[in-house]
Amino acid sequence: MYTYNLKIPVTFKNQPQNKKPLFQIPDHLSLDVKASGLKLVLILLNRPFKQLDIDFNTLKSVNRDQNYVLSSSHLNFKSIFNFETQVKHISPDTLYFSEKNGYQKNVPVKVPLYIKCQEGFGYKKPVINPAFVTLWGDSTLISRIDTIYTQALTLSNLNKNINTQLELLKANPQVYTSSSDANIFIAVAKLVEQTINLPVTDIHTSFQQRINIFPSSVKVKFTAIQNSFNPEDTSLFRAMIDSEKINTQSKKCPVFLSTYPGNVTIMSIEPQEVEILVFKK
């Protein structure tokens, strides 16, 4: 039998709330593994070792839940090595925490997105879990923070749903968060092209004059993600003109949308301009 030292990457989830680590949470564990020469060779063939996920909820806590013990009986090393192994020592073998003191508040979690879908596809607003995290720390530091961001998510040629875990970026080393990462789900679906007719109105109203618009309605072509557009959403479209910005030569005004649903992409407005006649009352 031989003893060999191995280092494996680790991540932690469900970090204890209302506690702060006395030392930095490790991203690697050092293991003294005892096994036969053949088994060690087979284990080493698995390098680089995949990451081991450690859930604080499964760890044994001592000292009134202030310290958490890392033991081979609570960690699934077989999933990393593909063999049952005898772990003689883990370093660090204990994670030390203290009660968090200071000001706290909840802030939203946001993910910086840099996404390009495959032609004909679109994506919905990401679902973030947790949507909010609790911050602890000095009140001066906490008061400056209104949002916690995840790592940026960059994707291209997207044509299917995405579900991924992203690390939360610390706003300040002295500010602690109730979670260290967030789950991001983005629904991706085909785009459907639709067309609606909208009446055109002037943004100005006056009792001194009346404005006639020709044509009185426009055709708006837009795309929306399949099954994401409801008939009720058509009430959110508003086609407008600004009669004070009339082209004096053509007597026409450009048409614009003052409001429209956030889940659509406008393709065209036909016609782009309308004629107006102003009648003084």
Image (tube, rainbow, N blue to C red):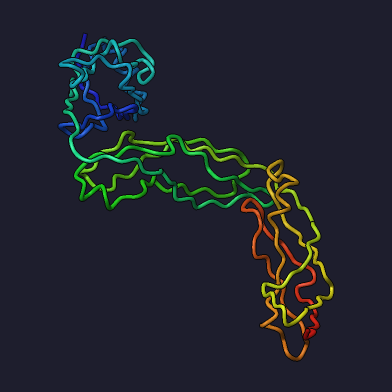
In this orientation, which residue lies closer to the viewer: 238 or 167? 238
Q: Residue at x 18, y 35 (%)?
A: 101
Left or right: 24 as drawn, with respect to 135: left
Picture layout, residue 7 above or below residue 146: above
Q: Quadrant of residue 212?
A: bottom right
Q: Is residue 219 left or right of residue 53?
A: right
Q: Give residue 166's position: percent from left, percent from top.
A: 41, 39
Say which quarter of the image contains residue 67: top left
Residue at the (52%, 35%) spot, across then down: 163
Residue 53, given in percent of the width and then of the height, sits at 35, 25
Q: Looking at the image, which residue sits at the far bottom? A: 249
Using residue 179 as the reference point, say whether residue 28 is left or right of it.
left
| Percent coordinates x, y for residue 30 in the rendering | 21, 25
Q: Residue at x 81, y 75 (%)?
A: 213
Q: How many marks?
A: 0
Question: In which quadrant of the rendered image does the C terminus lie?
Answer: bottom right
* Nearer the observer, 275 or 152: 275
x 26%, y 13%: residue: 72
Residues 111 and 107: in front is 107
**Image position of 256 with respect to 166: above or below:** below
Q: Residue 248 lies in what quarter of the image?
A: bottom right
